[in-house]
Image (cartoon, grey):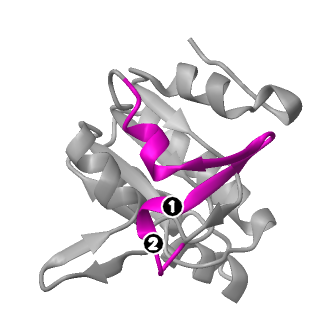
């Protein structure tokens, strides 16, 4: 089933309720990366930030999640051999695959990328394969091309 939460319906408790155990989640929101404290990086919901720690409250993390939100694939080095950020928090919780963004992106240019990505997923492709094909389907101008390359697929789904 598809559930769309937008506007005032996209509040943290409701979003978490729908994320819990979802086969595929897609959150289109503004992302903020906190280099000083990566686990407080967030996605902006109608009632405030959805932070990394909120995902830990889920009974089951989403199987696959798409985050066309600025800076959701950024990491900060902590200690000698650890990277922290939204993606590195989701994978150990049981999320098998994540598509996220490493930089600020043009909102309008993200739309054709996401439409093509979902088309690939509907055809049975993995997140990485669908992202590859979605990039190839983008218009050839610099904004669309840069937008496509700002996204990365993580995990095995």
Mark 1 element type: helix
Query: Vertical placement of 78 versus 30: above or below?
Result: below
Residue extending farthest to the top is 1
Residue 60: percent from left, percent from top? 32, 24
Q: CA distance from mark 1 to mark 2?
A: 6 Å
Q: Residue at x 32, y 68 (%)?
A: 84
Is the residue marked by circle 2 packed among few (<14), some (14-19), or many (20+) residues within 10 Å? few
Q: For this view, does 110 lie left or right of residue 120?
A: right
Residue 153 falls in image quadrant:
bottom left
Q: Quadrant of the N terminus?
A: top right
Please check the rendered image and state whether residue 39 is part of the magenta-colored stretch, yes or no. yes
Question: 7 above or below 67?
Answer: above
Relative to 84, is 19 on the left or the right?
right
Q: Is residue 157 in sight in this rendering?
A: no
Q: Which residues are magenta?
A: 34-58
Looking at the rendered structure, the secondary structure element under dot 2 is loop
Verify CB contact (< 8 Å) between mark 1 and mark 2.
yes
Q: Kindly identify which numbered label has been placed on residue 40.
A: 1
Residue named by callout 2 = 37
Relative image position of residue 104 (x, y in whole percent)? 65, 77
Q: Is residue 16 visible?
A: yes
Which residue is located at x 63 percent, y 53 percent?
43
Task: Locate residue 143 relative to residue 88 in the image: left or right.
Answer: right
In this picture, is 28 found above or below 143? above
Q: Position of residue 102 (x, y in %)?
A: 49, 75
The percent coordinates of residue 108 (x first, y second) are 80, 64
Q: How many marks?
A: 2
């Amino acid at each position: 089933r598809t559930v769309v939460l937008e506007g005032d319906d996209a509040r943290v408790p409701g979003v978490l309720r729908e994320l819990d155990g979802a086969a595929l989640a897609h959150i289109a929101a503004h992302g903020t990366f906190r280099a000083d404290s990566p686990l407080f990086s967030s996605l902006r919901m109608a009632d405030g930030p959805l932070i990394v720690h909120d995902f830990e409250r889920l009974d089951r993390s989403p199987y696959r999640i798409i985050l066309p939100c600025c800076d959701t694939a950024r990491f900060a080095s902590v200690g000698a051999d650890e990277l922290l950020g939204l993606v590195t928090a989701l994978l150990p919780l049981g999320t098998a695959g994540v598509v996220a963004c490493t930089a600020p992106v043009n909102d309008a240019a993200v739309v054709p990328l996401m439409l093509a990505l979902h088309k690939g997923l509907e055809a049975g492709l993995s997140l990485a394969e669908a992202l590859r094909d979605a990039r190839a389907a983008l218009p050839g101008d610099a904004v669309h091309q840069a937008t496509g390359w700002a996204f990365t697929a993580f995990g095995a789904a």
